[in-house]
């Protein structure tokens, strides 16, 4: 998952743009959508992939449920669309130091807690990912994959993708002297095409930096933010259309690739294409469309729990499954694994994120702005 901030303070639609310094309306429905994406990934991991923890593949253990949950891997794609929206919103009209401070303070406290908890779990459970002390320390940096070190949680691979997206936005902010509508549109339309050219020409370094597999999802989310901020626009619409087509093409390619990794559950390319379109439509509905004004307190809580839930659900859920499968009803095991993951997510949010986020952001920004 994609680690985006909770959406408690968002840009308003053009018709009701708030005065400077005033509170901005919430996009609570988008917080809820983030949790839906996290639960979809969780369900996919618990019920639709082949792992030894059940004693057989998830599709064999849940032959009916897995017909639905096998598509849960697309929750990652949904996270990236939402991240494109939120990160452009975070960077728009802000200096580089503020952007960097907000990202570090948002990502790292919960991540460090998840790494330490997971290493503690693996100290007495040999069913999880085993790493030595040095690799565990390197995991704390969030860039362990640069050194080809195994992440202590399988889901951590997406964080490396996110970091590269943040790097590109930071570079854009520096080189372009700040983000404007025109610069954001140009970036969101050119980046995915250049990224695909890097892949087609086997330009290893450029491909690693431009992340062609995921570029159109982030770029599509950025354009959805501009649509939310500025209203209907032909150029934004054309950019959205381009990135939507690229996302469908990429998702269709992955239907026989990433979707099949660790699983014998086949997915339908037409269904995958429809789901990609639906994901874009849902983000639009939650930010600019009919759900944009839907405000429920529990949705904001859901958004706050999404990131830590995504961080911990893998190894801790598998620990419950490994410990109880074969002796307890399988659906009850999934419920208990999910409950433990939510409990840990709430604990990390309440005891780590809430007390550390604001002070860490202030200190980082002060340090970055110091001459």
Image: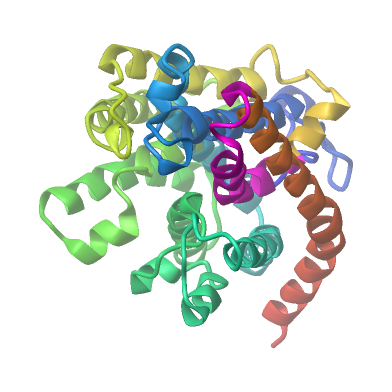
Residue 208 visible to the viewer: yes
Residue 212 at what x, y percent from top left? 29, 47
Q: Quadrant of residue 364?
A: bottom right
> Furthest residue to the front?
327
Residue 322 sits inside the magenta stretch: yes
Q: Which residues are magenta?
A: 304-331
Residue 36 at what x, y percent from top left? 62, 27
Q: In this view of the protein, which residue sits in the foreground, 359 or 14?
A: 359
Looking at the rendered image, the quarter that the C terminus falls into is: bottom right
Q: In this view of the protein, which residue sits in the foreground, 28 or 44?
A: 44
Q: Residue at x 56, y 27 (%)?
A: 227
Q: In this view of the protein, which residue sits in the foreground, 276 or 197?
A: 276
Q: Residue at x 87, y 48 (%)?
A: 21
**Left or right of 308: which side holds 268?**
left
Looking at the rendered image, the quarter that the N terminus falls into is: top right
Residue 15 at what x, y percent from top left? 74, 22
Q: Quadrant of residue 340?
A: top right
């Amino acid at each position: 998952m994609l680690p985006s901030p909770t959406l408690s303070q968002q840009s308003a639609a053009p018709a009701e743009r708030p005065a400077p310094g005033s509170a901005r309306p919430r996009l609570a429905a988008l917080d809820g959508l983030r949790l839906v994406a996290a639960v979809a990934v969780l369900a996919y991991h618990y019920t639709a992939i082949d792992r030894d923890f059940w004693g057989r593949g998830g599709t064999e253990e849940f032959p009916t449920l897995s017909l639905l949950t096998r598509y849960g891997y697309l929750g990652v794609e949904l996270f990236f669309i939402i991240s494109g929206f939120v990160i452009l919103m975070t960077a728009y009209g802000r200096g580089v130091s503020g952007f960097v401070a907000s990202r570090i303070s948002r990502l790292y406290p919960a991540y460090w807690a998840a790494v330490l908890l997971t290493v503690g779990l693996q100290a007495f459970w040999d069913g999880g990912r085993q790493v030595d002390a040095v690799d565990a320390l390197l995991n704390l940096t969030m860039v362990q994959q640069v050194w080809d070190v195994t992440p202590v949680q399988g889901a951590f691979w997406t964080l490396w993708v996110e970091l590269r997206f943040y790097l590109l936005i930071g570079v854009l902010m520096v080189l372009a002297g700040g983000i404007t509508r025109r610069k954001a549109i140009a970036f969101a339309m050119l980046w995915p095409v250049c990224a695909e050219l890097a892949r087609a020409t086997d330009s290893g370094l450029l491909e690693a930096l431009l992340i062609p597999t995921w570029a159109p999802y982030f770029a599509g989310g950025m354009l959805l933010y501009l649509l939310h901020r500025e209203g209907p626009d032909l150029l934004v619409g054309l950019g959205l259309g381009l990135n939507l087509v690229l996302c469908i093409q990429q998702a269709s390619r992955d239907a026989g690739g990433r979707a099949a990794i660790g699983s014998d559950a086949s997915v339908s390319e037409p269904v995958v294409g429809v789901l990609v379109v639906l994901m874009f439509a849902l983000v639009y509905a939650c930010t600019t469309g009919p759900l944009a004004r839907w405000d429920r307190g529990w949705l904001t809580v859901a958004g706050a729990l999404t990131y830590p839930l995504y961080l911990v659900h893998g190894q801790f859920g598998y620990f419950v499954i490994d410990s109880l499968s074969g002796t307890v009803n399988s659906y009850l095991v999934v419920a208990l694994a999910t409950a433990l993951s939510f409990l840990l997510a709430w604990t990390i949010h309440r005891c780590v994120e809430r007390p550390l986020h604001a002070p860490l952001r202030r200190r980082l920004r002060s340090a970055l702005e110091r001459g």
